[in-house]
Amino acid sequence: MTSSRTLWPVAIFSALLGGTIAVVLSAALGLGGSDTTTTVVRQAPLANPVSDGDDAAGLTARDIYKRDAPGVVFIRADVAQPSSSPFGFPQQQQGVATGSGFVIDENGLILTNAHVVDGASKVTVQFANDKTADATLLGKDRSTDLALLKVSPRGLDLTPLQLGSAKAVQVGDPVVAIGNPFGLSRTLTTGVVSALQREIPGLNGFSINGVIQTDAAINPGNSGGPLIDSGGRVIGINSQIETGGNGARGNVGIGFAVPIDTAKRLLPELKKGSVETGYLGITSRTVDDALEGLNLPVDEGVLVISVQPGSPAAKAGIRGGDIPAQVNGESVNLGGDIVTKVDGKAITSSEQISSMIGAMKKGDEVKVELVRDGKKKTVTVTLGQRPQSAVTPQPQPGQP
């Protein structure tokens, strides 16, 4: 059984002394005789660019690093971690968490992961020229694990990275990641897009949809750094890694990046300090072959397992299940409504309804078509704002 984990930033606590890691690189020189012919081969381009933009030839990894690395920053956040005193009393231990981020405009805006700066009392940003600046947290969204910082641009000579799009990305496209794994500043790794449309949990337990999977090596400390296409454009924000379930903290060849399109969509709200992502308030399960023996009245749709008390769904009268059952070893409550359409669009999976609601805003009205006791019913739901902390009970995968 594999497990996925957030790329929690590298933490150095006050009880530990920071050491210096020296990495020594050596190269063997081959000496040829007088008849030896030396051929210089230029590094091949990765490929043609894959995101929206011009049709310029693909850049080499070296080209991308030279162009984009100055825009990648090292983030240090003063955080407090809960711990226990020698007598068992709860207390706060002060520490420093580190991660990555990247400049997106000349006014000093910097994108990163929310978990890099979550709970921070102070955030400091270090640039490629070793200059540092205090950063202000403009806004964060724990649901999508995104945060927006602001530094004063005066005297910093900022290098904004070009934001692309993940919409045209395909499996096999080459990518590079630049970040600060284990505190090693501005490290470049290369790989490909391994899969698309993955789903990972946000900090509040809600699902982040449309995630890019890559085999470019990313590790703790890469959090918030850019995933870049062969045209040098950012297509994702590196966020989580697969650990293989063995307790390891390092890369096992599977990493996940939040698509840059999600960040671009939320930027106006992040600048204002509050993201009002739509919230329905149900946990659900896709109607699939595993439920075939239950003789449900529909072949496709989403079974409502539970409804959060006081949520928009509850106010609209949507009902969850009340019959405990086991389906392929999974505990579910049966007997709830089955959602078949949202605003006239057929619903075939929990991921789909989660993605649709997540793309809407607080206050939006949606018509939800459902089947209850074998009869069709339509209700109008006024969406709320998705909670920034986990709701109770804990959300299941696919909760919109």
Image (spheres, rainbow, N blue to C red):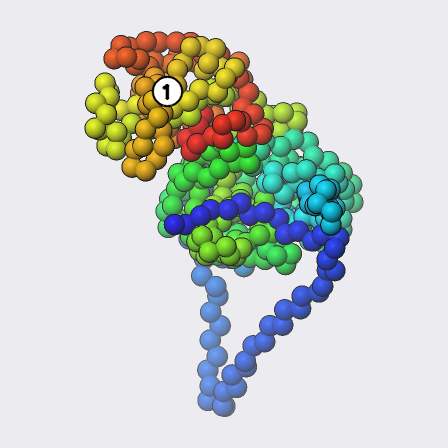
Q: Vertical placement of 100 versus 295: above or below? A: below
Which residue is more in the foreground, 232 or 259? Answer: 259
Which residue is more in the foreground, 189 or 288? Answer: 288
Q: Judge left or right: residue 53 versus residue 327.
A: right
Q: Amino acid at mark 1?
A: Asp
Tell me residue 320's x, y (percent).
Answer: 39, 19
Which residue is more in the foreground, 155 or 280? Answer: 280
Q: Which residue is mark 1?
A: 322
Which residue is more in the foreground, 196 or 398? Answer: 398
Q: Tag 1: Cα neighbours inside 10 Å, few (<14), some, or many (≥20)?
A: few
- Asked where in the image residue 24 lies, by quadrant, the reply is bottom right
Extreme residue in the right direction: 155
Extreme residue in the bottom direction: 34
- Asked where in the image residue 349 lies, by quadrant, the reply is top left
What residue is shown at x 76% (from left), y 48% (from top)?
132
What residue is shown at x 66% (from left), y 25% (from top)?
272
Tell me residue 94's x, y (percent).
Answer: 74, 46
What residue is shown at x 64% (from left), y 35% (from top)?
148
Tell me residue 343's x, y (percent).
Answer: 38, 15
